[in-house]
Amino acid sequence: MNTETVYPILSGKRALVVGVANEHSIAWGCALAFRKLGAEVVLTYLNEKALPHVAPLAAEIDAQLLPLDVTQAGQLEALFAALAEHGKLDILVHSIAYAPKADLQGGLLDCSLDGFLQAMDVSCHSFVRMAKLAAPLMTDGGSMLAMSYHGADKVVPNYNVMGPVKAALEASCRYLAYELGPSGIRVHAISPGPLQTRAASGLKDFDLLLSDAVARAPLGQLVDILDVGNTCAYLASPYAHRLTGSTVYVDGGLNIIA
């Protein structure tokens, strides 16, 4: 018999989760955790090709579904205009990243300028742009969460251009935490351990990274999308109301191992 008791600590809260591509996405784990704890959830989908994969998930949790491609002029503004029509926002999750395959799979020395700029725009600066648009809707304060990775802090072979880009994202989270703190808005970078997601599949020798994580992590297990989602739900809850500006690892302790 399942005796788990769930307290709806996010009841009355509204969460925007950006980055669900399918049921394996980290963003989907966040959406599930928020909904389970009582929050209203809004999901985005990248384009018409992605819609058939995301729409059934949105229906599963009774989430509003809106289009968003941050590389397309005006889409981000249109998204937040649509959100504003239905009231305030309490939680923002940014879980998108991109680099052209040639730049991602080559070393940093070989990364093109265009590839570097695309990676920085989609994976980092889009979060800053979202934060600027989201802040006025967080009239009662709120939480903003962006997905990073340990390669932002230490060199992870084959992570390549995404290392500097995620380092910029983590620094952006700290500066946004400073600037938005007076408005009661808390900002965190979340650093999950290796996960088998569609985005991660673009990394060279990713299977080796997964097996290494299991072997070296103190808990001896890989994390899953619900581990990440539950951590984000905690950080968005009243229980974490005085925490901000951190990079929070959800990796079974892997980051502490030299």
Image (tube, rainbow, N blue to C red):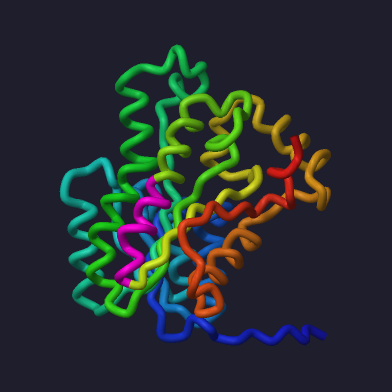
> Measured along the vertical axis of the image, is residue 187 above or below residue 173?
below
Q: Residue at x 52, y 60 (%)?
A: 28
* 180 in magenta: yes
Image quadrant holding the C terminus, namely top right
32 lies left or right of 99: right
User: At which x and y percent is residue 210?
Assistant: 72, 38
The kind of secondary structure the magenta stretch mainly shows is helix
Specify the segment rendered in magenta.
172-183
**For residue 211, which quarter of the picture?**
top right
What residue appears at the point 39 percent right and 58 percent down from the top-left corner? 177
Quarter of the rendering occupied by the N terminus: bottom right
Q: Give the camera-side residue of 156 and 71.
A: 156
- Residue 27: x %, y % from top left: 50, 57
User: Where residue 64 sits: x, y (%)?
Assistant: 35, 71
Q: Nearer the viewer, residue 173 or 127?
A: 173
| Res 221 visible | yes
Q: Residue 232: give x, y in percent of width and height.
A: 54, 64
Q: Quadrant of residue 257?
A: top right
Write the residue at 60% across / 59% down: 228
Q: Visible in this render: residue 53?
A: no
Magenta stretch encompasses residue 78: no
Residue at 25%, 70% (x, y): give it.
83
